[in-house]
Image (tube, grey):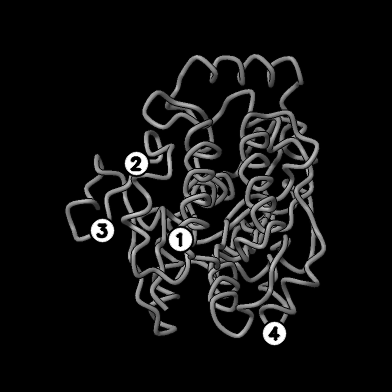
Amino acid sequence: MRILLTGSTGFIGHTLQAALEAAGHTVHGGASPRSAGAQHGLVPMDFARDTTAAPWLPRLQGIDAVVNAVGVLRDTRARPIDAVHRDTPIALFGACAQAGVQRVVQISALGIDGSDTRYAKTKRAAEAHLQALAAQGRLRPAILRPSVVYGKGGDSSALFMNLARLPVALFPGPVLDARVQPVSVHDLAAGVVALLGPALEQTGVIECTGPEALTMGAFIASLRQQLGHSPAMVLRLPQLLTNISARLGDAVPASPWCSETLAMLGSDNVGNPAVFEQLLGRPGVHYSQLVATACR
């Protein structure tokens, strides 16, 4: 198949492109015209500005399927979250319907239902539009909702590994207690490959998780053990100081830590892996094996 892959230079997108090409597909990767990747044969596309169908229609000529792997953690002037998560994906999906590109795979996120964060609201809006087009028979979408995605090159993965190396670690209480179900980035990529191959007709929302849930604190401890270190001393940051630190992060656009991050990391991010495992044809990689298998 000829696949248009948005976000191909990102952590998840880079892994998706490698897996899709290994499966024999031709991938037309997309990158922002302001990024270095746009100078190396990638399709220029701007999720901050391409909020109508017009710029997408030429890019869809000769394309059989679209995979959208673009995402941001927080709102910035260069990458406004409303445009990146909602307006531009909606324009892209509408252009797919116009161009007759029915197969769309949307990389969304687990835990967005019931969340009041802008991240969750904008992700839900894109999903709702995609599902409305599906209900009209104009698209055949699959929506993947991964839990915490772990692998080489991921910002969150690097953060977790750095925390796991500390002999003494200080964590916000809600983050320590939140339950996650980490999924290998390679398993996520294998799911996308299946959806563009043997599971081409499968549609709907698929929760993409590892086989077992645990608290974030226990996950960091597991990573430390996988690195061969003895257990660390873990201290709990008082709630007042947690809130203050998040508000300070709100004032620093480049900081990954802010009130929205606290709300997301402080909430459970777990699901039922049954459909995902059926898609893979096997259980996903267990969190206790992620360091050895997901960082290749």
**Quarter of the image containing the N terminus?**
bottom left
- Name the mark nearer the viewer: 2 or 1: 2
Q: Residue furthest left?
A: 39
Instruction: Give the SS element for disc 2.
Output: loop
- Label 3, on which residue? 42
Res 281 label:
4
Q: Residue at x 74, y 79 (%)?
A: 278
Q: Pick whichever, 285 or 167, lies toward us.
A: 285
Label 2, label 3: how many angstroms apart (C-alpha)?
Answer: 12 Å
Label 2, label 4: how many angstroms apart (C-alpha)?
Answer: 36 Å
Q: Residue at x 39, y 68 (%)?
A: 63
| Marks 3 and 1 in Cβ contact (< 8 Å) | no
Rendering coords of residue 8 (x, y %): 38, 58
- Name the mark nearer the viewer: 3 or 1: 3
Label 1, label 4: how many angstroms apart (C-alpha)?
Answer: 24 Å
Q: Earlier in the sequence, mark 3 or mark 1?
A: 3
Instruction: Give the SS element for disc 3.
Output: loop
Instruction: Give the SS element for disc 4.
Output: loop
- Label 1, on which residue? 152
| Marks 3 and 4 in Cβ contact (< 8 Å) | no
Is 59 situated left or right of 198 in this image? left
Query: Dot 2 surroundings within 10 Å: few (below 14), some, or many (20 or more)?
Result: some
Q: Amino acid at mark 1?
A: Lys
Q: Amino acid at mark 4?
A: Gly
Instruction: Give the SS element for disc 1.
Output: loop
Is 259 situated left or right of 196 in this image? right
Q: Earlier in the sequence, mark 1 or mark 4?
A: 1
Rendering coords of residue 226 (x, y %): 61, 65
Q: Earlier in the sequence, mark 2 or mark 1?
A: 2
When asked about the image quadrant of residue 105, the answer is: bottom right
Q: Amino acid at mark 3?
A: Leu
Res 46 label:
2
